[in-house]
Image (cartoon, rainbow, N blue to C red):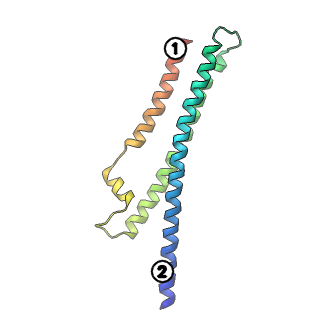
């Protein structure tokens, strides 16, 4: 009987360690998400600074003017990939919470889902749409 109890304890420890590791991964992915947003903004700003400082120069081609749009599109794809990974991990943690925690009590993911807080995902979508929109407007207005 003690073997069964120790196997159960080992299973619980494994699940506990797995959940801790997944929380760390969510934290890391969230930081990476913010880094992608910031780095794309800084890169586009640096390119526009260079373009404006060399505006009279004949070396600026239409291809260079497309670089900010490519950066924004690649950043959008990276963000979608990171965000989908976060959602996948959150879904797994939610399933584990629902299976392991008795009904009246809730873990963070259950609480978060119940509140249906979509602010962060809506913010990210709005950020990239607005960012790409500004780049497209800059082509139309400035070039």
Location of residue 42 by image quarter? top right
Please give left or right for residue 128 compared with residue 46 in the image. left
Please give left or right for residue 78 compared with residue 129 in the image. right
Q: Position of residue 104 (x, y in %)?
A: 28, 67
Which mark, residue 8?
A: 2
Q: Where is residue 82 in the image (x, y as percent from the top left)?
A: 53, 46
Q: For label 2, count other residues whose C-alpha is less than 10 Å away and answer few (under 14), some (14-19) or many (20+).
A: few
Location of residue 95 by image quarter? bottom left
From mark 1 to mark 2, how far is it between C-alphas?
A: 65 Å
Residue 76 appearing in the image: no
Q: Position of residue 124 (x, y in %)?
A: 45, 38
Query: 92 or 115, which is in the foreground?
Result: 115
Q: Residue at x 37, y 65 (%)?
A: 98
* Label 1 element class: helix
Q: Earlier in the sequence, mark 1 or mark 2?
A: 2
Q: State the residue lying farthest toward the left.
A: 104
Which mark, residue 94?
A: none
Location of residue 69 by image quarter? top right
Which mark, residue 140?
A: 1
């Amino acid at each position: 009987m003690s073997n069964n109890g120790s196997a159960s304890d080992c299973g619980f420890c494994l699940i506990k360690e797995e959940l801790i590791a997944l929380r760390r991964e969510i934290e890391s992915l969230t930081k990476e998400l913010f880094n992608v947003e910031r780095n794309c903004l800084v890169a586009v700003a640096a390119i526009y600074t260079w373009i404006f400082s060399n505006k009279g120069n004949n070396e600026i081609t239409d291809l260079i003017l497309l670089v900010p749009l490519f950066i924004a599109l690649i950043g959008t794809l990276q963000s979608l990939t990171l965000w989908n990974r976060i959602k996948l991990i959150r879904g797994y943690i939610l399933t584990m919470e629902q299976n392991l925690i008795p009904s009246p009590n809730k873990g963070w993911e259950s609480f978060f889902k119940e509140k249906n807080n979509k602010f962060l995902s809506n913010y990210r979508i709005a950020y990239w749409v607005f960012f790409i929109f500004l780049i497209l407007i800059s082509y139309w207005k400035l070039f």
